[in-house]
Image: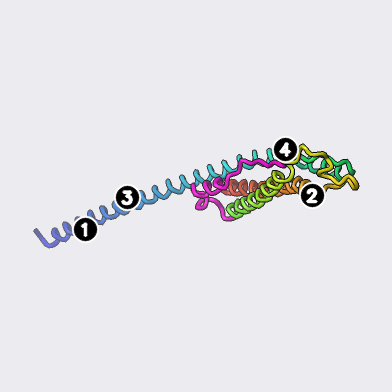
């Protein structure tokens, strides 16, 4: 075999090896790119699912909260009006119920929310959680006082709760109108914070589409 023939054969093998190497590289890169693409697509879908779920949840919550808040506001205003007019309105047990669970937001974040949600959305979510925790703490305190001071004495005459001379609540029962008004403030704070979070969620969804 001549030198030129050997050289051509050698170059041919090198060419095949180079082509095979390129094909392997392209194949690996394509697989890597496809995997990344599928992962990004899955994350985007998960991101949108979380945002859509939050959006629907807060839309329902805000609407329901407005109805409940309006009722609480009427009750507090009517009691305050009657109290200021010297009508000595009756006291009733203070009861505050909620289906909020501290684990709800934690579960959401652990399911991927921390990695997928925008930082501003997470901060607003944390702010809502703080409003809820502080508000519920107040409600529980007022309910405890109601259970201790009002509930055991519901069969008492109205003079037990009011000073007949000035028709004002006795000192230890002044917490009752405060509790009603605190409930209204809590409802307003919830509505404001939920609305802010809803706007942030909708803005984040809009950026993704």
* Range of residues picked out in magenta: 92-119
Callout 3: SS: helix
**Which quadrant of the view contains residue 143?**
top right
Residue drawn at (49%, 49%) of the image: 110
* Callout 3 crowding tier (Cα within 10 Å): few <14, some 14–19, many ≥20: few
Say if mark 2 contacts mark 4, CB within 8 Å. Answer: no
Name the front one of labels 3 and 1: 3
Name the front one of labels 4 and 3: 4
The quadrant of the image that shows the C terminus is top right
Callout 1: SS: helix
**Which quadrant of the view contains residue 82?**
top right
* Callout 4 crowding tier (Cα within 10 Å): few <14, some 14–19, many ≥20: few
Residue drawn at (59%, 49%) of the image: 204
* Callout 1 crowding tier (Cα within 10 Å): few <14, some 14–19, many ≥20: few
Residue for badge 3 = 27
Residue for badge 2 = 174
Total number of numbered discs in the rendering: 4
Q: Is residue 204 left or right of residue 139?
A: left
How far apart marks 4 and 3 lie (CA) works out to 60 Å
Along the line of sight, which residue is nearer the eye, 152 or 205?
Answer: 152
- Return the disc, 4 or 3, that comes first in the chain's sequence: 3
Residue for badge 1 = 14
- Return the disc, 3 or 2, that comes first in the chain's sequence: 3
Residue drawn at (69%, 41%) of the image: 95
Residue for badge 4 = 67
How far apart marks 1 and 2 lie (CA) works out to 95 Å
Name the front one of labels 2 and 4: 2
How far apart marks 3 and 1 lie (CA) works out to 20 Å
């Amino acid at each position: 075999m001549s030198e030129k023939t050997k050289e051509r054969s050698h170059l041919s093998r090198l060419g095949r090896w180079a082509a095979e190497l390129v094909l392997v590289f392209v194949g690996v890169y394509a697989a890597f790119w496809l995997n990344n693409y599928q992962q990004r697509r899955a994350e985007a879908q998960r991101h949108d699912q979380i945002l859509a779920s939050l959006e629907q949840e807060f839309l329902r919550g805000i609407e329901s909260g407005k109805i409940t808040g309006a009722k609480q506001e009427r009750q507090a205003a009517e009691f305050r009006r009657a109290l200021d007019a010297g009508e000595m309105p009756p006291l009733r047990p203070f009861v505050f119920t909620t289906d909020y669970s501290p684990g709800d937001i934690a579960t959401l974040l652990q399911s991927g929310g921390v990695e997928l949600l925008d930082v501003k959305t997470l901060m607003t979510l944390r702010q809502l959680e703080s409003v809820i925790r502080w508000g519920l703490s107040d409600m529980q305190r007022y309910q405890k006082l109601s259970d201790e001071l009002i509930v055991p004495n519901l069969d008492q005459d109205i003079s037990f709760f009011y000073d007949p001379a000035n028709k004002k609540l006795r000192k230890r029962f002044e917490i009752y109108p405060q509790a009603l008004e605190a409930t209204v403030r809590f409802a307003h704070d919830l509505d404001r914070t939920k609305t802010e979070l809803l706007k942030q969620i909708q803005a984040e969804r809009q950026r993704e589409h």
